[in-house]
Amino acid sequence: MPPIVNTHHAEAWNGWEGGLWARNPDRYDRMMGGVNDALLAAAAIGSSERVLDVGCGTGQTPNPGSDLARATAAVRPLLRRPSPTQQGMGSLTDPERIREVLAAAGFVEVTATLVDAAVLLGRDAADAAEFLFATGPYRYNLDGVDGEVVARARADVERALRAHETPEGVRLRRVDWLVTATCRSSPAPPAPENSLRGDADRS
């Protein structure tokens, strides 16, 4: 097995941060459910096509225009550093960075389109706030912060989330980047010199 270069990322996914994701699959599905229609429409998968779904989970840093960003404004000044897992997926919130990474990997026709969708974050404001403060970016940044400061920020976030409570749960507007790209076809590698000579000899 090759050595792991990003040890912090591996430790996070195999530790408490990965455990949080594993314990909350239904919640993360609800958080992403609103963008699935747009994703599948953009993919336009045909009946004869095969699909490899590669991903690092669900959820990501919210777009500044989303309800979640506004509801969590009280704690945002304390979230100065991306958590280890967020450094990967959370770094792809800038369309120019997305294009740069995909172009370097050999993709062309890269597009990034904003998708606006509604998501359910929790049963009520208290449940949603508890979940948020258990996620990587919050826990990673709030470690070592005075407990009273964290408690006040959490109370402010919970209070802001109450405005989004519905009979179904805390419903928020979410804004994400929907990215499409085409893998550039690589030319066939040249045949080995010995193979060409052998063909010539046989002719």
Image (cartoon, grey):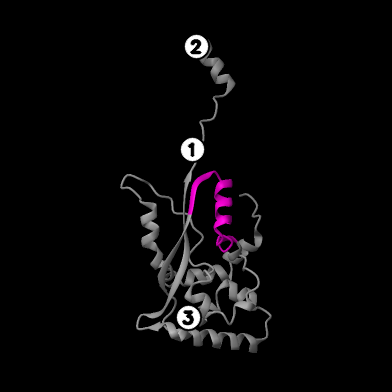
Q: Is residue 154 above or below residue 184?
A: below
Question: Judging from the image, what secondary structure is the residue with disc 1 in?
Answer: loop
* Of pointers 1 and 2, the one earlier in the residue sequence: 1
Please say whether residue 14 is visible from this viewpoint. Answer: no
Residue at the far left in the pictured view: 47
* Of pointers 2 and 3, the one earlier in the residue sequence: 3
Q: Which mark is residue 128?
A: 3
The residue identified by callout 2 is 202
**Amino acid at the residue labelled 1:** Ser
**Amino acid at the residue labelled 3:** Ala
Residue 11, position in %: x, y? 62, 64
Q: Is residue 147 above or below residue 25?
A: below
Q: Which mark is residue 185?
A: 1
The CA distance from mark 1 to mark 2 is: 32 Å
The CA distance from mark 2 to mark 3 is: 73 Å
* Of pointers 1 and 3, the one earlier in the residue sequence: 3
Foreground disc of the pair 2, 3: 3
The CA distance from mark 1 to mark 3 is: 45 Å
Residue 188 vs residue 161, the one in the foreground: 161
Mark 2 and mark 1 in contact (Cβ < 8 Å)?
no
Q: Is residue 81 above or below residue 102?
A: below
> Label 2 crowding class (10 Å Cα cut-off): few <14, some 14-19, many 20+?
few
From which residue to which does the magenta span run? 88-111
Please say whether residue 96 is visible from this viewpoint. Answer: yes
Residue 184, position in %: x, y? 50, 41
Residue 77, position in %: x, y? 63, 78
